[in-house]
Image (spheres, grey):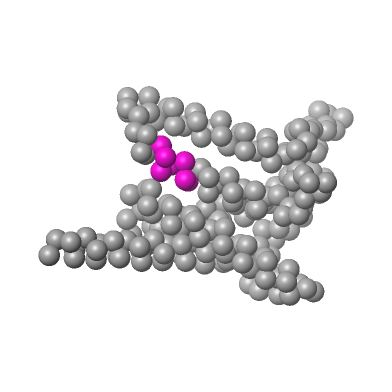
Amino acid sequence: DRPLQRSFDLKGRIQVFEISYTSLILAISVIWLLMRVCVCTKRKQLSWKREVQLMLVYICIVVVARFTFFPFSKANGRIQPLIFDAALMLPPRINLIPLVNLLNYEIFKEMLINVIGNTAMFIPLGIVWPSVFKRLDTHGKVMAAGVGFSLCIEILQLLFFDRVTDIDDLILNSVGFAVGYGIYLLVKALKNRADACKMR
């Protein structure tokens, strides 16, 4: 990965800002560690079981960040950087009409990769989040968390000219999250049934 790079205009304002995948993961990791240290210090206790559970959330965030903010293909074996360019940021690239961009592929395989990719990467979140966060105790809260997370990603993509804020991505991410949540509910139901059989 290339290091974080910047360029400035004559007034000293940032015009171009490049962020490598390594730099982003490092930033996420530092913020994550600081948050966990603060929480553990406040509670004056450390639960390794809880930290392992939360680590799954961290892994999900890192993986999603890789495929939502950075180009899927590599150049010379390296992940290309995320680029902020003030001169190209406006007008933002937004699609609010479902299926317009989704079906606008000359090669069917590319469309299939996009659909499967955007759906599949949110399936683990639908499994992990309700497992880890007990406050997500209703279907509405769980789905609101998943859709809200995807929406935040789409909004953040407005800052980068080479990314597209797309309603199709939001829909596919939400479907993936719902599938994951369905798997979580199925496993939970099977576990409860097995426990009930043991008590008979």
Relative to residue 167, is residue 135 depicted above or below?
A: above
The answer to whether residue 146 is seen in the rendering is no
Q: Quadrant of residue 117?
A: bottom right
Relative to residue 199, is residue 82 depicted above or below?
A: above
Q: Is residue 107 magenta?
A: no
Horizontal side, residue 37 vs residue 94: left or right: left
Residue closer to the observer: 153 or 69? 69
| Residue at 52% in and 67% down | 175
Where the N terminus falls, by quadrant?
Answer: top right
- In magenta, the rendered stretch is 51-57
Q: Is residue 55 magenta?
A: yes
Horizontal side, residue 18 vs residue 46: left or right: right
Q: Main secondary structure of the magenta part?
A: helix
Horizontal side, residue 45 vs residue 87: left or right: left
| Residue at 87% in and 30% down | 10
Residue 19 in percent (x, y) is at 72, 38
Residue closer to the observer: 37 or 52? 52
Residue 174 in percent (x, y) is at 52, 63
Disc count in the image? 0
